[in-house]
Image: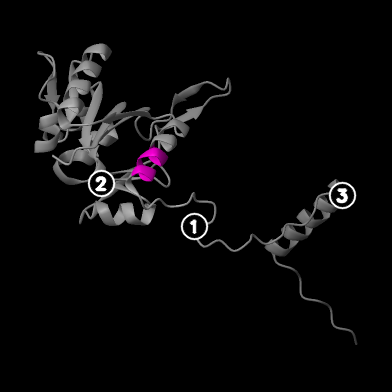
């Protein structure tokens, strides 16, 4: 006496129908994805300082990020003051660090500085945020911001984020950038401004990061 086959479960029935529909539509069966080691497709890392700076500048252009190369901290401070005046910013969310204090030393009078201890509502009312980067990556264009002194809170709330970093924080690869960051707390990686496109193919704010990103890279170590 022949034995009837066991009834197929719901998943088998669904997969069978998908296979039949694919054949009727002339579609090829799905093939397994090739092996991926997490590094396929990444640009080459950069060992020398000049190569890192040039590569990072190219990445910033590709990622639609404003990039400013400064010789000294004074140049960065003057550039920030000019940017603030040009954009007519009057309320800035700022990371509480001596370095950020130095780059904001030349701000025009009347500009309010809001720190993370004032709360997210106060930060959300700011026109821009100013933070110090923990590391930058010439390989992918990533910028790493740490959690100390309210940097993450400022980064999360600012519609425009201005990040300052020194050249010795610019790494040749993403792995090296994570080591350079060396923060025991949380880290956030930015790879360009947070933008998406609507049905009309126009950029719109996506709500999960700054919609405008400005990076100042300072060549001098002091």
- Which of the two labelled residues, at mark 2 and mark 3, occupies the earlier sequence position? 3
C-alpha distance separating marks 2 and 3? 57 Å
Q: Which is nearer the eye, 192 or 166?
A: 166
Asked which quadrant contains residue 198, the reply is top right
Crowding near the residue tagged with mark 3, few <14, some 14–19, many ≥20 C-alpha atoms within 10 Å = few
Q: Which residue is mark 1?
A: 39
* Numbered circle sitting on residue 24: 3
Q: Main secondary structure of the magenta part?
A: helix
Crowding near the residue tagged with mark 2, few <14, some 14–19, many ≥20 C-alpha atoms within 10 Å = many
Q: Which is nearer the eye, 123 or 101?
A: 101
Secondary structure beneath disc 1? Answer: loop
Quadrant for the N terminus in the image: bottom right
Please state the extent of the stretch shown in magenta in the rendering: 50-56
- Which of the two labelled residues, at mark 1 and mark 3, occupies the earlier sequence position? 3
Q: Position of residue 159 (x, y in %)?
A: 31, 26
Observer able to see residue 213: no
Q: Position of residue 121 (x, y in %)?
A: 20, 28
Residue displayed at 21% across by 23% down:
80
Q: Which residue is mark 2?
A: 169
Give the foreground label among 2 and 3: 2
């Amino acid at each position: 006496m022949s034995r009837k086959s066991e009834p197929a479960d719901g998943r088998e029935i669904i997969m069978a129908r998908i296979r039949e529909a694919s054949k009727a539509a002339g579609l090829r069966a799905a093939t397994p994805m090739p092996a991926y080691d997490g590094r396929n497709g990444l640009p080459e890392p950069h060992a020398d300082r000049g190569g890192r700076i040039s590569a990072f500048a190219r990445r910033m252009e590709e990622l639609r990020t404003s990039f400013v190369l400064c010789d000294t901290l004074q140049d960065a401070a003057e550039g920030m003051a000019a940017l603030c005046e040009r954009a007519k910013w009057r309320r800035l969310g700022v990371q509480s660090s001596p370095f950020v204090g130095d780059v904001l030393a030349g701000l025009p009078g009347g500009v309010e500085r809001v720190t993370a201890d004032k709360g997210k509502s106060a930060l959300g009312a700011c026109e821009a945020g100013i933070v110090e980067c923990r590391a930058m990556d010439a390989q992918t264009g990533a910028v790493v911001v740490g959690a100390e002194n309210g940097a993450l809170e400022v980064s999360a709330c600012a519609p425009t984020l201005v990040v300052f970093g020194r050249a010795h924080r610019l790494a040749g690869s993403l792995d090296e950038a994570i080591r350079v960051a060396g923060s025991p707390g949380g880290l956030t990686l930015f790879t360009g401004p947070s933008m998406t496109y609507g049905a009309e193919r126009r950029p719109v704010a996506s709500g999960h990061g700054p919609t405008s990103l400005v990076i100042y890279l300072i060549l001098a170590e002091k």
